[in-house]
Image (cartoon, rainbow, N blue to C red):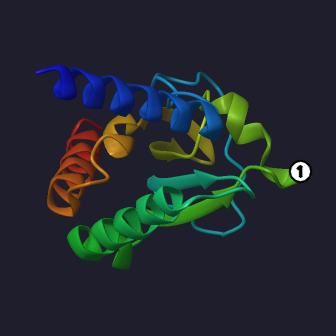
Amino acid sequence: MKIQRVTTRFAIAFTAAVFLMLGGWPAASGPSAGSAIAAKTEEQPRFIAYYFYTNKRCDSCYRIEKWTESTVKDHFQQAIENGTLRWQTVNVDKPENKHFVKEFNLYTKSVVIVEQKDGETLRWKNLEKVWQLLRDQEKFADYVSDEIQSFMEKS
């Protein structure tokens, strides 16, 4: 029993240290009234699945990006092909992308689904649980696809 408590405490301390090194907990989701997303394409998709990252990345950061990209492309192929949904990675350390940190209350690497119209954000949601599901790719994919599907259906 004592070994189990020590192991549990170590796991909690280790997890807290990793989150602090990564910059904290994922941001809460919510609307961003009137905020604009600058798109460089003529025709803008209605939904964008973003992965926001910084110059400093760990194995978990790369795993989140890889698993999210795979999930989006596998589960939403038709929406991507018809232009309804776009997958996009964004380095928020680049000066032209720093505005995303404030717009979406980003504290760490994050997966965010956004609905937009005419380049303006109507609503968004940070998929906060991606960090908690890094040990199980199937649960991770189910979570990401369910959240995106639910988000898209509510519009």
Of 5 and 126, which appears nearest the observer? 5
Of 147 and 43, which appears nearest the observer? 147
Instruction: Describe residue 116's horizontal placement relative to residue 139 as left or right.
Output: right
In the rendered view, would you say 14 is above or below 28? below
Q: Residue at x 64, y 58 (%)?
A: 57
Of 99 and 3, which appears nearest the observer? 3
Q: Does residue 124 appear anywhere in the picture?
A: no
Residue 142 placement: quadrant: bottom left
Instruction: Describe residue 80's horizontal placement relative to residue 106 as left or right.
Output: left
The x and y percentages for residue 74 are 25, 75
Instruction: Describe residue 154's horizontal placement relative to residue 110 as left or right.
Output: left
Helix, strand or loop at disc 1? helix
In the rendered view, would you say 71 is above or below 133? below
Instruction: Report the amino acid beneath label 1.
Output: Pro
Q: Residue at x 45, y 34 (%)?
A: 14
Badge 1, how many Cα within 10 Å: few under 14, some, many 20+?
few
The x and y percentages for residue 122 are 50, 33
Q: Residue at x 57, y 46 (%)?
A: 109
Instruction: Please tell me how many numbered marks the rendered image carries.
Output: 1
Residue, disc 1: 95
Residue 136 placement: quadrant: bottom left
The x and y percentages for residue 53 are 63, 53
Quadrant of image for the N terminus:
top left
Query: Residue extending furthest left?
Result: 1
